[in-house]
Every structure is written in structure tokens, then in C-alpha cells.
Amino acid sequence: MFLRCNRRVKDGKVHDYWNVVENRRLSDGRIVQRQVLYLGEINSSQREAWRKTIEVHGEGTRGQVALFPAGSMPADDVDAIGVRLSELRLERPRQWGACWLAMQLWQELDLEGFWRPRLAPSREGTPWLKVLQTLVAYRLIDPGSEWRLHRQWFDASAMANLLNADFALGEKNTLYRCLDRLARHKDELFKFLTRRWGELFDAKFDVLLYDLTSTYFETDVERSPEDLRQYGYSRDKRGDCRQVVIALIVTPEGFPLSYEVLAGNTADSTTLGEFLERIEQRYGRANRIWVMDRGIPTEESLAKMRRMGASYLVGTPKGRLSRLEQHFLGEPWARVREGVQVKRLVTDEDIYVLAQSDARIDKERGMRRKRLRRYVDRLQALQRQRLTRDQLLMKLGAAKHEAGRAANLIKVEIPKDAATTASFEFRLQRDKLRQVRRREGRYLLRTNLAAQAPERLWIFYIQLTEVEQAFKELKHDLAVRPIYHRKESRIEAHIFVAFLAYCLQVTLKAKLRPLAGGITPHEVLAKFKTMQMVDVRIPTTDGRELVLSRYTQPEAEHRMLLAQLRLTLPEQPPPKITAKQAREASAEPATA
């Protein structure tokens, strides 16, 4: 294996993207390269660390272990057991590597210490803590319903071996009953995790990113008026399904500070006030900076934040830019980085920052041109058709809806007394086009942080992409949607388990961040999924059976990741040997 660099020129700047690759020789003698791991853009010290790891693992040695087949055992060893190698069997291949990695992340966060006093075994001996570990590992590695965990995944995984348990952990009623014991500990858990992330990664919680999303249901049952499942604005484009809204606070590094499950018809602008009070009650008063997108804060909530002494940085609607556009003309641009400029305007109420991004200009302009071109083509096609007035209005409405805001740049004139459409006309409104072009790639921020430079404020704001990434990982990697549960308490528990899995994922992401920016937790888990565990069964000469549960030895790419993450694989489980009596009893035919 070795490092390979792929060089790209983007926006006039050269970017070097690194990969770990290996050579594979084909049967015809040719050599092809296989990408083992994508590292993204890395600095020189990270590059040297990866090179050193690859060199170390390129010098591995192999050895052989001698076995004693029947008839060739050493005569002086009284503990020797004869085995029938010709009858060796491999049974129950199951996924081991990713399950083991999930349990390592669980131990690193010391979740065992948090949950042990809160999830004590039941009087019947049900190990609730191990059931929770199974639920969280399942959500992290191969998410699905609890029914699928019971029917398929548990037996296809090595969780029973890792937790020293049996199928009792995967019994369906046990899984559902465990969900009923979780959500009440949410506030205590997040307090615990903030301390733990501070100890492990020196995580800071002085900048908070706040946003909302929704997740929908595939079931529809009778509900009370206070039920959280309601119809509302669906970010998943599933307006036909009832949903709940999830409000989330994370740090710029992605560490979650808190979340709440709200009714599906909750308006974004009504959520902030309650969250401010809850965070202060849970973590105390502190000088935190709240970063939010437009649509969440209202004038009342911003006034409340000023009274509380809280700092905020929020996006603003473009209508406010129209009112302040003339005031910005005399202010100078400050360069944040290549292709990004900002302006600062101080008013009696707040400070406004106008940001302009060349990349965003190109993106918005390209989208607008594409929609406008498609809309004009459609209008020209309608001019060639002979339709009644009602038919024309319907087709124009559909075309305008598809064009979105680009349709406002075209003026369509239809004679009121026209029976057909041959005479309708349209023209481009150039004054509106010039106004739109001036505003493309620009957005307005509002803050009460007087001491912060505009460049710093812009950096704070673009970190909102981290909370969007958290929602993306919850919905795609951890499959928090759709929800199939019918009981409201289990709906919240389902989301709670997803957030526990996200906590493991963000911990792995924090461990990977100093190694290389291009490695994702999803990719690392996929690599470790290839490590399997099998049961090796070897009959002995005295009628018993030797059972060895063995995980497959790590390949070079696994060893490389283990070295970088500073993880050590455990010893192989000790062998077991079946009792002769039990084997003979199981072989006896059943009698009526």
C-alpha cells in the first residue's frame, strides 16, 4: 500500500486530495490499483503519519500452527486431544468488526458507567444495559426496525459474543420494553456527555448551532389532540404523512448539546424562547453565541435574548436587505478568504453583515438561468398551441410553479377577450433581472456581537452546515426515518436511541478529524464490517467436539486504521469443548 495524490484545480486554486491505494496483480500479468481509503486534503504531518503506518504494516510476517491429527499425537502429553481434521466445519459466519468498534466507542464515552445505575437488571434477570448496547450498535451499523433486529440482524452479528449473552437480548418484547426505560434519562445523559467530550476532545460549548427538521411516520393510528404526530411542513417532501419536528443544538464540531421532539405542526419561530430557558436551566447562564438561520428567531425572541444577555448571529430575510441596501453602499468590503467578501453596518438596534461569495454567485446564477431558460422554452411552446383561455391559464400556472422565483422575471400578457392563445405575449423584465443579479450570492446576517470582526462572524455562520450534516447523518446513516412505532413514548425512545448512536458516530468523527479530513465514520464502519466471526467445529477422537469462535484476522487496511485510531484487537475467545454425554444424547433418535 502507498499514498497517491490526485490534484485538482478548483476556482483557480490547486487542491491535493490523498488516497491510500494498493496494487493488485491480475491473471494476465497487469497491475491495477485499488483504493483502500480516501483521506481528502491532509497536511504534511498527517501525510507522514500515514506513510509511517503503511510502512509498518507492510512488514508483517506470517507463521503456521501445528495441529495433531488422529493417530499422530505426542505420546508424552496427557492433555493432548486428538482431532479429526477431515471433519472440520465452519458455521455461523456473522458480522464482528463493526460491532466491536461500536463497543469500543461505547467504552470510550464511559456510557457503561452512566447507564449501569439507571438500567439495572430486572428481577427476572433481563440485562437491560446489554439490550440497550445492542439497540445502539444496530442503529449505528445497520439501522432498521426493532422487528428486523429480532428476525435477522442479531443472529447475523456477533453481539452475543461481545456481550457474553445469548438471543435473550434480541427477543422482540425485550427490545420494546427496553425502549420504555430510556427517554426519562435524556437530560442527565447530555450533561454527562458534554463533560465527557470536554475531557476527551477539549470540546467547547460557547458557540451553539440551532436548527429544526422533521421526520415522518408510515403508520396512522387514532390520536388525541395533544399527540405529537401532526401534519405540517415536511422537510422530507412527505406532506401526505404525519410527522414530528426535531429541534437540535450542536457545536461547530458536531457534538450535540440537546434536542427536543415537538409536534409536527410546530412553527419554527415559536421554538426558540423555550429552548433558551431550558439550556440555561440545564447548563447554567453563560456567554453563549447562538447561530441560527432565518425563519427561527422573531423580533420578540431576539429582544428576549438581549434582555438575557445572550449573543446571537442569525440570517435575515432578503426583504431587510432591500431596506438596508443603500446604507451598505458607502461601507468598504473586507476579504475573508479567496472569493468571499463581507461588509459591516452598525445600526442603533443591531449590527448587520453583508456577505458575498463568488462560488455562491455562480451557483445561484446557474440555477436561475436554467430555470429561466426552461420557462421561456415552455412559453414559446404554448404560443404555438391553440388552446382555450381556461386551458392556457392552467398550463401557464403549471409552468410558473415549475419555474419558481425565475417566473417573476417574465411578464406574461393575455388579452382578456381572446378565445384562443395565439395572441398572448411575454417579455423579460430587465429592471427586475438587474436587481436579482445584484443580490445573487449575497446574504445578510444580523448580530449583537459588537466586538467581533465581520470576517469572524461569517465563519460562525457558515458553521450552520454542521447541524445540517447532523440531520443528514441521522436521516440517512442512522435511518431515524420513517418511524413505525404507534406508542408516543416509543416514538421519543426511537429518536433517543438514534441520538445515542449519533453520539458514538460523532465521537468516531472527532477521533478521525486530526488524522485526515476525508475519512468519514461511515467509511470506517464499512471497512470493519468485513471482519467476520465464525465457529470452527472440529470433532475429537473421543466423540466430543472442539468449538472455536474466531474473528477473521485483520487485513492490512484494518491494521492501518487500528494503528491510527490507537485501538488493539482483543484476544480470540477461548476454545470450548462439548461434553460427550450431551453429544450422545442429542444424537439419539426421538421416541414416541
Image (tube, helix red, strand yellow):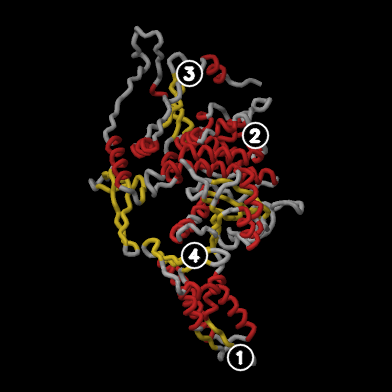
Q: Spatial distance from mark 1 to mark 3, Cα to Cα?
A: 93 Å
Nearer the observer: mark 4 or 3; the answer is 4
Q: Give the residue number, with chain letter if any, for mark 4.
A: 353
Side of 177 relative to 333 (left or right): right
Label annotation for residue 174: 2
Q: Spatial distance from mark 4 to mark 2, Cα to Cα?
A: 54 Å
Q: Spatial distance from mark 4 to mark 3, Cα to Cα?
A: 73 Å
The residue at the far right in this view is 224
The answer to which quarter of the image holds residue 73 is top left
**Quick one: label 3 or label 2, which is nearer the N terminus?**
2
Label annotation for residue 415: 1
Q: Quadrant of the N terminus?
A: top left
Q: Residue 446 at what x, y percent from top left?
A: 54, 63
Nearer the observer: mark 1 or 3; the answer is 1
Task: Name the residue type under label 3.
Answer: Ile
Q: Give the residue number, with chain letter if any, for mark 3.
A: 577
Q: Residue 199 at what x, y percent from top left?
A: 48, 37
Secondary structure found at label 3: strand
Nearer the observer: mark 1 or 4; the answer is 4
Side of 309 relative to 199 (left or right): right
Neighbour class for label 1 at 10 Å: few (<14), some, many (≥20)?
Answer: few
